[in-house]
Image: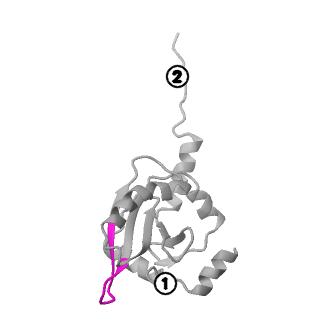
Amino acid sequence: MAKSKTKRKQYSVGKKVSMTADYLTRNVLLVSVPRNDGYCIYHMKRKCLLTPDKLIMSSLSKPHHWGVFVAALGIDASGKKFFMSDGFTAKSRYYTRDLNALASDYMDGVVASINSNLFKGEAWIASPSGYQVTEEEAMSIFESMLAWKPRTVEEQIADLMR
């Protein structure tokens, strides 16, 4: 009498959802700059901000292997914009809501390496696909997001009124 073979599922439902979320967010970056509360969604190929829709937001709510680029922004005496940076790739999957805690350890080291008189703020860029942005890409993203421009008094008052 022959033993009957049991069929095994090739992928579980959770694995399929995780793979789909990774595929949908492959060209997406999350960018946090001092001017904004929270983060913005930036498309790497189109080089523009994305309007968050339900599909992207639900895909970002799943855990990912994040590649994170942290930077301390500064302006020197001659008015030239610069940043000190560090990057890392997460060893395990993290949720989007845990990015600030994940980046804070690295951010402390980067902020300590910049002159406090030149320091203008902290910023980070995170990729759910684990992609590490280069310093040239980070500079163009930060400039397009107006990271070095100080917030106006009206913007600060509007934030306090929320």
How many marks the image carries: the answer is 2
| Vertical comparison of 88 with 146: above or below | above
The extreme bottom residue here reads 78
Q: Indicate which disc residue 51 carries.
A: none
Helix, strand or loop status at disc 1: loop
Q: Residue 7, located in which quarter of the rendered image?
A: top right
Amino acid at pointer 2: Lys
Q: Which residue is mark 2?
A: 5
Name the foreground residue: 54 vs 160. 160
Q: Position of residue 147 (x, y in %)?
A: 45, 79
- In which quadrant of the rendered image does the C terminus lie? bottom right
Q: Which residue is mark 1?
A: 150
Q: Residue 59, located in which quarter of the rendered image?
A: bottom right
Q: Position of residue 133 (x, y in %)?
A: 36, 67
**Which callout, 1 or 2, points to the residue nearer the camera?**
1
Helix, strand or loop status at disc 2: loop
Q: Position of residue 150 (x, y in %)?
A: 49, 84
Q: Give the residue at x 33% y 89%.
A: 79
Q: Residue 51, located in which quarter of the rendered image?
A: bottom right
Cα distance, mark 1 to mark 2?
Answer: 67 Å
Name the foreground residue: 65 vs 160. 160
The extreme top residue here reads 1
Q: Position of residue 148 (x, y in %)?
A: 43, 82
Name the foreground residue: 11 vs 160. 160
Q: Give the residue at x 35% y 78%.
A: 117
- Is residue 84 located in the magenta-colored stretch of the structure? yes
First reached walking from the N terminus: tag 1 or tag 2: 2
Amino acid at pointer 1: Pro
Instruction: Look at the image and give the residue range highlighted in magenta.
Output: 74-85
Report crowding for label 1: few under 14, some 14 to 19, many 20 or more residues within 10 A (C-alpha): few
